[in-house]
Image (cartoon, rainbow, N blue to C red):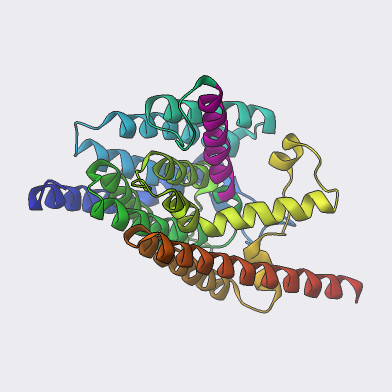
Amino acid sequence: MGGMTDLTKIAISSFAAFAFVYFAMPFFRELAIRYRVVDFPGKRKMHRVATPLLGGVAVYFGFIAGLLLNAPLSREVMAILAGSTIILLLGVADDVWGLSARLRLAVQLIAALIVILFGDRINFLPNNPLSDSIEIIISLIWVIGITNAFNYLDGLDGLAAGSAVINLICFGAILYRTNQPQLFMVCSVLAASSLGFLPHNLRHEKKRVFLGDAGATFLGFVLASIGLCGYWAKGDPVKIAIPILVLGVPIFDMVFTSVMRTAEKKIKTLYQWLKYAGKDHFHHYLVDLGLNNAGAVIFIYFTSILLGLSAMIASVAGPITALISIFQGLIVFGIIGVLIVMGRRRQGDRQRH
């Protein structure tokens, strides 16, 4: 980092982002109500009253305001900004009109390619055309996967935004230590914007605001892009796992749920995967186990913190200690898997009786 001046500037930008989102949220809430951009209760929904959906738009504008106070921006940050703007607009259109899964996937591919081509991509293979193509494909899967995984995580009040804050703090701590000021700034400003949204998401249901698909996919896209553009390995291939640990909860939820849906023949194609919606995610099963909504959210917060701490240890440790930290993360995933299976069995018992 460039010293105290840079930190002060980032702190001011982050506070400005927080203040904008917190104080502007009533305006976006009224805007959503006026134009009926609301989420209605339903079978697979956890809320009981129609709730405004433009919270994510406020988070986006707070994020933009904070970034612009730190201009000029690096090429990779500009790529993240461009791609995330496309994702935000796509999400708003989906919240307002409802879009096909194919169209959403096509636009997500374009946004991801912008980050990959103008920001960075996964690099671990020898430098040749075939290896480059493989790395681009893996990078696309990473960005699109995390973007949608975070949207799936947005099922309980405070879950997606609060998890994003934890993930961003963990990423930010590593980026600060490894002297990556532009990406550190992105983490700080977006965490502040998300914190500005959280009190409005946790209010009484008649005053509550949701991120909407726009906000959840926007957060997921930026987090995926940070994981892609950040320099984690420093010559140690074990440390490539750092972003996977930080984003372990949405990754595991997406992978495990996808495997179970495929095994149960609920989905057969990528299109069906994007389109399918059901109450069969990690947070749903925690509720089925007996936790209330707030308890499930707090449980996932602590899980994310534990995985983030493992990532931070791996970032400063030698190869052996890094491997131990990764193994610890795998144990956490195993515990989560057991909880999900228990939740599924309990849900099945309820349905039979």
Question: Among all residues in the image, which is located at the extreme right?
Answer: 352
Question: Among all residues in the image, which is located at the extreme bottom?
Answer: 290
Locate residue 117, reporting x and y percent: 43, 24
Residue under the image location 43 percent in, 55 percent down: 164
> Which residues lie in the magenta part?
130-149
Q: Does 201 appear above or below 125?
A: below
Question: Among all residues in the image, which is located at the extreme top?
Answer: 129
Residue under the image location 36 percent in, 43 percent down: 230
Tally of numbered tags: 0
Q: Does 192 appear above or below 96?
A: below
Instruction: Say which quarter of the image contains residue 99.
Output: top right
Residue under the image location 85 percent in, 53 percent down: 264
Locate residue 256, reporting x and y percent: 69, 56
Specify whether residue 137 is painted magenta: yes
State left or right for residue 303 relative to residue 236.
Answer: right
Instruction: Say which quarter of the image contains residue 317.
Output: bottom left
* Residue 30 appearing in the image: no
Specify whether residue 328 is painted magenta: no
Q: Does 297 appear above or below 69?
A: below
State which quarter of the image contains the C terminus: bottom right
* Residue 177 appearing in the image: yes
Nearer-the-camera pick, 131 or 183: 131
